[in-house]
Amino acid sequence: MGAHNGHNHLNDDESHGRNVSSKRNLLWALTLTGTFMVVEVIGGIVSGSLALLADAGHMLTDTAALLLAYSALYFASKPADNKRTFGYGRLQVLAAYTNGVFLVLLTGWIVWEAVHRFIEPNPIQSVSMFTVAVIGLIVNLLVFKILHSAGESNINIRSALLHVLGDLLGSVGAIIAAIMIWVWGLLWIDPLLSIFVALLILRSAYYVIKDASHILLEGIPINISMNNIRSDLMSIKGVEDIHHMHAWSLSEAEPMMTFHALVDPALDSDYLLEEMLQLLNKRHGVGHATIQVEVNNCQLGEEGCKLD
């Protein structure tokens, strides 16, 4: 049996450019969020508003989340070494997972405090609460805009973006609560809106943890169909069978594959190998593939392959 391996790697220039842009955006977002966090803590204490304190607590985790996301991108850009041959790209997924867990813990704290506020309502200075909430909304909208474009293709930034989205909703809730307290004196609206925001944050955290866990467990990338890939590869003239297929990803944007390909021994196996690599790259977005080409028959005992 003759066999040889082939590898395919995408050009890293585009990925490097995205990382530089993402790091710059994260740094801006981190600076704005950290600065306003201090303002909101002071405003929450002065006004006595749980909605503001909850949002300030969320902004504290946002600051940590953005710092974690920035650190992950920084280390992800480091080259591979002898101990980590795939580099540090997986740190982005670990950061996203950690941020998701922080969000869950945060919602628990908000709900706990809200229950106490229902039982024993605190006096609230609605004007101070409204002023700080409006400033917070402006800051959160700016940070959201900075991160939104980069967050579409990076689970790490998207998880940090969800933190900011929770803050934005918190600011909106605080504004509504301040108006209702000022007009009607409804102190209970403050903890009620806090619980509502907490539930929205919890829903976002669930999806971040779910997506990050799927990658960490070496699940098949969401946008990849193994059946379609196998069918497309076998449509290449000379490729007789595709088997022993595995697909996973280092991060959301880095899908990888390994498989065995049984090919017609009468044809040039190097040419067929190049055809398969190009198809994977152009049609399915798989930029890193390792293919074992078999020109006679499958390795003895392999599952799912055709034996002579």
Image: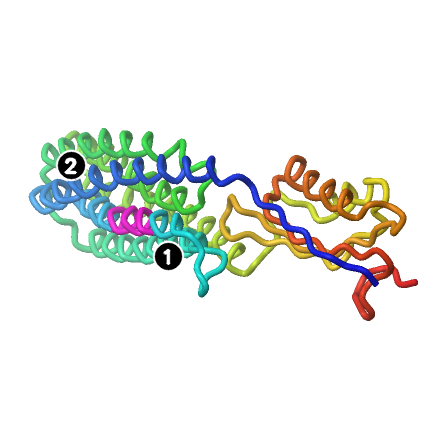
Q: Nearer the viewer, mark 1 or mark 2?
A: 1
Identified by mark 1, the residue type is Thr
Ranked by sequence position, the earlier of labels 1 and 2 is 1
Q: Residues within 10 Å of mark 1 (few under 14, many from 20)?
A: some
> Which region is colored magenta?
61-71
Report x, y in % for residue 281.
Answer: 64, 39
Left or right of residue 301: residue 54 = left
Question: What quarter of the picture does the C terminus occupy?
Answer: bottom right
Relative depth, front residue between 282 and 49 = 282
Q: Residue furthest bottom?
A: 301
Q: Which residue is mark 2?
A: 185
Total residue callouts? 2
Tell me if residue 67 is in the magenta stretch: yes
User: Please, what secondary structure does the residue beneath circle 1 have?
Assistant: helix
The amino acid sitting under disc 2 is Gly
Q: Is residue 11 above or below residue 255?
A: above
Location of the N terminus by quadrant is bottom right
Report the coloring of the rendering: rainbow
In front here: 177 or 286? 286
In this view, the residue in front, 5 or 255, is: 5
- Neighbor class of circle 2 (other Cα within 10 Å; few <14, some 14-19, many 20+) is some
Disc 1: which residue: 98
Q: Residue at x 47, y 49 (%)?
A: 207
Q: Indicate the position of residue 57 as horizontal and vertical percent values.
A: 22, 50
Does residue 9 appear to the left or right of 92 in the view shown? right
